[in-house]
Image (cartoon, rainbow, N blue to C red):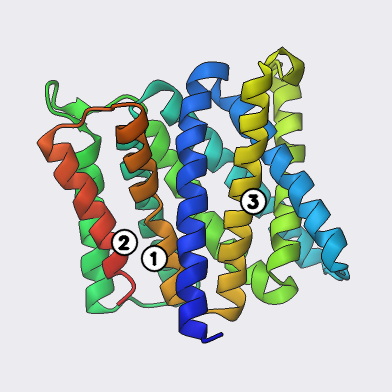
């Protein structure tokens, strides 16, 4: 298959997977708490990746430096999503999803500072649009202050931005499948350890059966999205895969408006559209 077409398909797969995961994560974060929603969905994703690794019979050969990077990546991803799901728990899903778009800016910033990558004029314009759009989307117009959950979401975006630079380095060394598998393993171990330290209740059996099934399903969907994006970074055109997948908030916001009947102001709606357009512009 043509590399360009494959890159577009992988980007769309990542966009749909993450968009659905974030929407369901927002719904269940409000029902069972952000921590449990994240932990058990990531655990489900880990089982899925282990099964996939067994089917594809991969060989494991990693160095000490890669193990160190995997640990850092897992911690950053975990902390990022903890902040993100906390934002979902206390805020409006549409607004939180739009604000989270700023992780693309942090990814580019870290790549600029630490990896020597430079932005074109269009990419710089896209970054400006993302920041402006996320700012407008995150404001509570009645009180002229940040909406609930936005501060937590910005912190989550910061960790996400750093994670994807590290993930790209790891994927180029050991491939998309091992990267996804080991990061998932690190996330689950970190979350279990974190729950022990903060004495967070994590009894999965106390959750209703319907919710259990949905959380397990969303974990598989998210793991598939991460795997597709990592695969795209290795064999496809990253400049196409990343911005398309980054437009996941289109899916999340659409689902929130359709199924949750969430209301947003005209200014917030304009901000959401501006931020999403900015993501697309960064591909040029």
Query: Disc 3 marks which residue?
Result: 223
Disc marking residue 243: 1
Whether residue 187 sits left or right of residue 282 in the image: it is: right
Answer above or below: position of 42 versus 33.
Answer: below
| Between marks 3 and 2 in the image, the one whose residue lies nearer the viewer | 3
Q: Residues within 10 Å of mark 3 (few under 14, many from 20)?
A: many
Question: Which badge, 1 or 3, comes first in the chain's sequence?
Answer: 3
Residue 218 position in % (x across, y down): 60, 39
Q: Are marks 2 and 1 in contact (CB under 8 Å)?
A: yes
Q: Kindly state the secondary structure of the residue where label 3 is placed.
A: helix
Looking at the rendered image, the quarter that the C terminus falls into is bottom left
Residue found farthest to the top: 206
Q: Is residue 39 visible?
A: no
Residue that appears at 61% across and 31% down:
214
Q: Kindly state the secondary structure of the residue where label 2 is placed.
A: helix
Disc marking residue 279: 2
Distance from the alpha carbon under mark 1 to that under mark 3: 19 Å
Q: Quadrant of residue 98?
A: top left
């Amino acid at each position: 298959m043509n590399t360009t077409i494959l890159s577009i398909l992988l980007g769309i797969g990542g966009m749909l997977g993450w968009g659905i995961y974030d929407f369901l994560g927002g719904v269940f974060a409000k029902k069972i708490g952000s921590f449990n929603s994240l932990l058990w969905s990531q655990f489900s994703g880990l089982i899925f990746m282990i099964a996939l690794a067994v089917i594809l019979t991969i060989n494991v050969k990693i160095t000490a430096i890669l193990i160190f990077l995997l640990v850092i990546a897992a911690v950053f991803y975990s902390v990022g999503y903890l902040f993100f799901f906390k934002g979902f728990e206390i805020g409006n899903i549409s607004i939180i999803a739009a604000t989270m778009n700023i992780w693309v800016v942090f990814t580019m910033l870290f790549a600029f500072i630490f990896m020597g990558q430079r932005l074109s004029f269009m990419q710089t314009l896209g970054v400006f649009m993302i920041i402006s759009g996320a700012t407008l989307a995150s404001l509570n117009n009645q009180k002229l202050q940040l909406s609930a959950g936005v501060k937590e979401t910005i912190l989550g975006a910061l960790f996400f931005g750093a994670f994807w630079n590290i993930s790209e380095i790891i994927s180029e060394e050991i491939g998309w499948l091992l990267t996804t598998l080991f990061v998932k393993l690190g996330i689950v171990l970190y979350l279990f350890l974190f729950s022990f330290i903060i004495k967070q209740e994590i009894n999965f059996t106390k959750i209703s059966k319907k919710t259990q099934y949905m959380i397990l399903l969303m974990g598989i969907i998210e793991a598939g999205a991460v795997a597709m994006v990592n695969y795209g970074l290795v064999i496809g055109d990253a400049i196409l895969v990343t911005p398309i997948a980054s437009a996941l908030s289109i899916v999340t916001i659409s689902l929130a408006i359709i199924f949750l009947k969430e209301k947003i102001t005209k200014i917030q709606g304009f901000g959401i559209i501006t931020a999403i357009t900015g993501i697309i512009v960064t591909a040029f």
